[in-house]
Image (tube, rainbow, N blue to C red):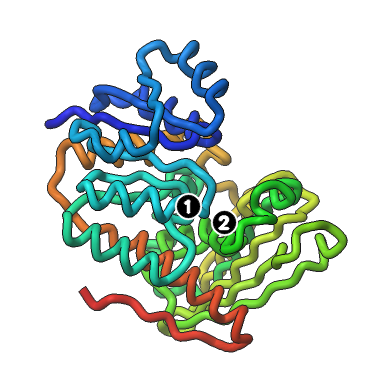
Amino acid sequence: MKKINVAIIGLGVGEKHLIAYNKSKYLNKVSIIDFNKKKMKKIKKKNKDVFLLKREIDIYNDPKINLVSVASYDHFHYSQVIKSLKKKKNVFVEKPICTDEKQLKNIEKLVKKNRVHIESNFVLKTISLFNSLKQKIKRNKKKIYFIEADYLWGRYKKLLQWRKNSKNFSLILGGAIHMIDLVCWLLDDYPLEVSAYGNNIALNKTKFKKNSFHVIILRFKNNLYSKITVNSNSNTNHFHELKVHSKDFTFYHSPIGTHTFNKKNGKNNIFGKYPDKENRNKIIHDFVEKISKTNYKFNKHLFNVMKICFSAKKSVKNKSKVKILYDRD
């Protein structure tokens, strides 16, 4: 077992990374850096043991740092991930790990070449409610025929900040990706093709000129379908709405309640917490433990989810159905 030295880039959501790392028994040292020096000093006051970095390049040049946690703006991710991988450092990165297919291929090549671990912050898999649902789906997988997964973001004002000026920002990569990850994880499978659409009706009188809403249709083998939406202007609270339809049961998780239904017993509750925020550190804890204790294993799921997202973006742009291409290995 080796101890982990981590460097965190970006102290917005990166501060949550810091909280998670501080609770890991495999952690040795944490270094932090942010454009905002006042924020760095403020965090230092609350975390006496963290080390403040003056330059980002010091992360890549320090051989003792074996994990880089990227929590910067989306358009910085690729550069910071690539620099880390070239130095054979493991990477935990906020979604998306990059913003186009060429970047993804470059990252995939380096990850395989240098045999390093990479993970993204797909926190929905840590929620106990969805873990309970996964077990139910596993028992009834052949009977599932339709899943609806709606990312009710309800935080449109965030689109009017740095995102409105980011050339490659997309709500598919910034929001729908969570529900795509969740559906593929629940089914333990990946779709064959995608049709996707978008509009900006909700924010057409603002400075945000990209699509503020998307609907994505995924077709799996045996003609199982999933409809995924990302809604920046939802009038609900931030919520991950999910509906699963099978021959034997229907699962509803919405802002007004969570239930399962079947013909024999009617409506029943399903066990598990939501939003279960106290359990979301688990994804970082598990990743650090993996680096510390296990041999390298390529994270095929992460790259498949990214490929689905890029195919969905292509479908919106070309206004056509797109076949999703995965690596065979």
Query: Relative to 14, does residue 180 appear above or below in the rendering?
Result: below
From the viewer's perspective, is 180 left or right of 139? right
Q: Residue at left 69%, top 73%?
A: 198
Q: Residue at left 70%, top 66%?
A: 210
Query: Relative to 65, does residue 290 appear above or below in the rendering?
Result: below
From the viewer's perspective, is 91 left or right of 221? left
Q: Dot 2, how many residues are within 10 Å of its Cα: few (below 14), some (14-19), or many (20+)?
A: some
Type of the residue with mark 2: Gly
Query: Relative to 21, does residue 230 appear above or below in the rendering?
Result: below
User: Are the residues at dot 2 and dot 1 in contact (C-beta closer than 8 Å)?
Assistant: yes
Q: Is residue 85 visible?
A: yes
Q: Dot 1, how many residues are within 10 Å of its Cα: few (below 14), some (14-19), or many (20+)?
A: many
Disc 2 to disc 1, how far (Cα)? Answer: 7 Å
**Secondary element type, mark 2:** helix
Q: Give me the disc on residue 141.
A: none
Q: Quadrant of residue 102?
A: bottom left
To which residue does mark 2 refer?
A: 174
From the viewer's perspective, is 125 left or right of 28? right
Q: Give me the disc on residue 95.
A: 1
Q: Which of the two labelled residues, at mark 2 and mark 1, occupies the earlier sequence position?
A: 1
- Of residues 268 and 26, the one drawn nearer to the viewer in this rendering: 26
Q: How many marks?
A: 2
**Secondary element type, mark 1:** loop
| Residue 30 at x, y percent in the picture | 33, 25
Q: Residue at left 40%, top 60%?
A: 185
